[in-house]
Image: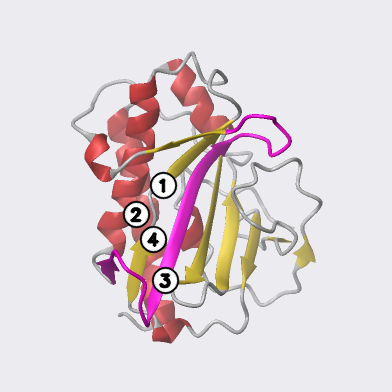
Amino acid sequence: MRSPAQRLALAVVVVLALLPAAGCMRMRAPAPHDWSGFLDDYSRLELGAQGDLPYVYRNPKAKWATYDKVLVEPVALWRSGKHSLDPIPDDDLLHLVAHFERAVRTRLGSGFRLVTEPGPGTLRLRLAITEARASDKVVDVLTATPDDAGAVSGPIGPELGAFIEAAAIEGELRDAVTGELLAQGIDLRRAGAPPRLQTWEALDRALAFWADRACSRLEARTGRR
């Protein structure tokens, strides 16, 4: 079984989902405890092995070496109703989503060509920070762009910090032309994780670190380095 991994509060979930699978038998993940509904099909997910995502699926037929471009859809934040996160300023939520997308785009862009239209050899990346339940009558979706990251510094509010600790990161990669699912996964904060992030600067360092680690392995898997 997995040992508690030292993880920072946010990880780049889909990129990590591409890490090579461990050479051991996978166990089917338990029934989702009312996930957000961001992913189309949670039944494919398996329990990750040691050092992997808690829940992950990789298409065994995926031909990773054929991909050299990535189409990144706007990162989203899914929340249960418009008032579920009222204690957190909307600007903070926008900054969180924008910083996440900026970290992904920055690191992916060093090994892949980022594009805006589907084409041969293109991965379509969908990511979301989720704090929602699919059974809720209203699920509010917030999106941002890297431009919304702005220049922000200083401490992270306690409400936002608590949200980061509790939220899940869900994501998937598909072939941008055919729509074939290549990988999907869910990341959660685990036991033994470092203390809550205190500042925006710490958040940016965490995102950059994990984006670099994950994208380096993706580059190796696809032959981009």
Along the polypeptide, which appears first: circle 4 or circle 1?
Answer: 1
Tell me which residue sits at (75%, 69%) in the image.
26
For marks 2 and 1, give the CA distance: 10 Å
**Are the two marked residues, 4 and 2, in contact with CB atoms closer than 8 angstroms?**
no
- Indicate the secondary structure of the residue bearing disc 1: loop
Q: Residue 213 carries which label?
A: 4
Q: Which residues are drawn in magenta?
A: 112-139
Q: Sort mark 3 into few (<14), some (14-19) or many (20+) by Cα contacts within 10 Å.
A: many
Which of the two discs, 3 and 4, sits closer to the camera? 3
Disc 2 designates what residue? Answer: 104
For marks 4 and 2, give the CA distance: 11 Å
Disc 1 designates what residue? Answer: 75
For marks 4 and 1, give the CA distance: 20 Å
Along the polypeptide, which appears first: circle 1 or circle 3?
Answer: 1
Q: Is residue 115 left or right of residue 56?
A: left
Q: Mark 2 belongs to which amino acid?
A: Val
Location of residue 218 by image quarter: bottom left
Q: Sort mark 1 into few (<14), some (14-19) or many (20+) by Cα contacts within 10 Å.
A: many
- Classify 88 as above or below 181: above
Q: Is residue 114 magenta?
A: yes
